[in-house]
Amino acid sequence: MSSTTISDQAGAAGTSAAAKVIQPAWVRIMHWINAAAMIAMILSGWQIYNASPLFDFQFQRSLTLGGWLGGGLLWHFAAMWVLVINGLVYVALGFATGRFRRKLWPISPRGVLTDLGKAITFRLSHADLSAYNYVQRLLYAGILLVGVLIVLSGLSMWKPVQFQALTALFGGYDTARYVHFGAMTAICAFLVIHILLALLVPKSLRAMIIGR
């Protein structure tokens, strides 16, 4: 085999690797829509919380969205529709395309503990971004379940009369508020971890922007 042929094959392999799509376009678009809507909901939710705090603290006014209770509610409901519609389409496509099955399954306690130990000691490999490690699988699957919980608890607070059965399932309106707050806290914790991982592995952020 000539050196020219070898060079051509190497070039083709390099081009193929460079062209490998890690995050398809629909994932990238919906990811950033979800991110913007979620941040708007969190900040406006903090504004709503400050009007009637559950605990002995309030969120700093500069970190809230809406300016007052009515403004916070308007922002919250506007972002809610964006997040719910975009989220439902994302979940539907995730199942329809088999992405969730490929990316998030299987999840095993042993695998999670092993990868968590590697992550803590900075030995976890990020060479192949197309495959999620067990910690990522657990986090992403968990945040989908938290998303369902926060939507259902939000509905029971928004329309407690129309959704009486749902509100009762949460133990009443007041308990639903605590569940909603807890789910919001879990989402905020996820976002912190998600952003830290993106900073530690910059190529994962690049893949979510350009796909490769």
Image: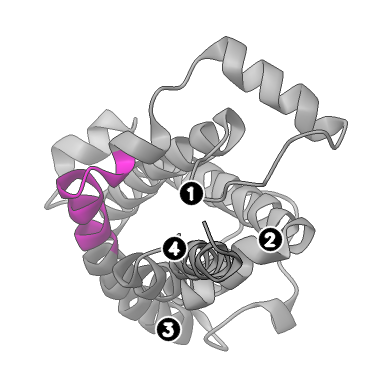
Residue at numbered disc 2: 198
Q: CA distance from mark 4 to mark 1?
A: 9 Å
Which label sits on residue 20?
Answer: 4
**Mark 4 touches mark 1? (CB < 8 Å):** yes
Q: CA distance from mark 2 to mark 4?
A: 20 Å
Q: How many marks?
A: 4
Q: Nearer the viewer, residue 4 or 206?
A: 4
Query: Mark 3 or mark 2, which has the lower sequence index?
Result: 3
Q: Amino acid at mark 2?
A: Ala
Residue at numbered disc 1: 130
Q: Which residues are magenta?
A: 87-100
Up-down relation of residue 62 to residue 204 (above or below)? below
* Residue 203 visible in the snapshot: yes
Q: CA distance from mark 4 to mark 3?
A: 47 Å
Q: Nearer the viewer, residue 125 or 168?
A: 125
Residue at numbered disc 3: 70
Front of the two marks 3 and 2: 2
Up-down relation of residue 26 to residue 55 (above or below)? below
Q: CA distance from mark 1 to mark 2?
A: 15 Å
Front of the two marks 4 and 3: 4
* Residue 40 visible in the snapshot: no
Q: Position of residue 101 (x, y in %)?
A: 30, 35
Q: Position of residue 6 (x, y in %)?
A: 55, 62
Q: CA distance from mark 3 to mark 2?
A: 35 Å
Residue at image coords 55%, 66%: 14
Query: Mark 3 or mark 1, which has the lower sequence index?
Result: 3
Disc 4 is placed on an element classified as loop
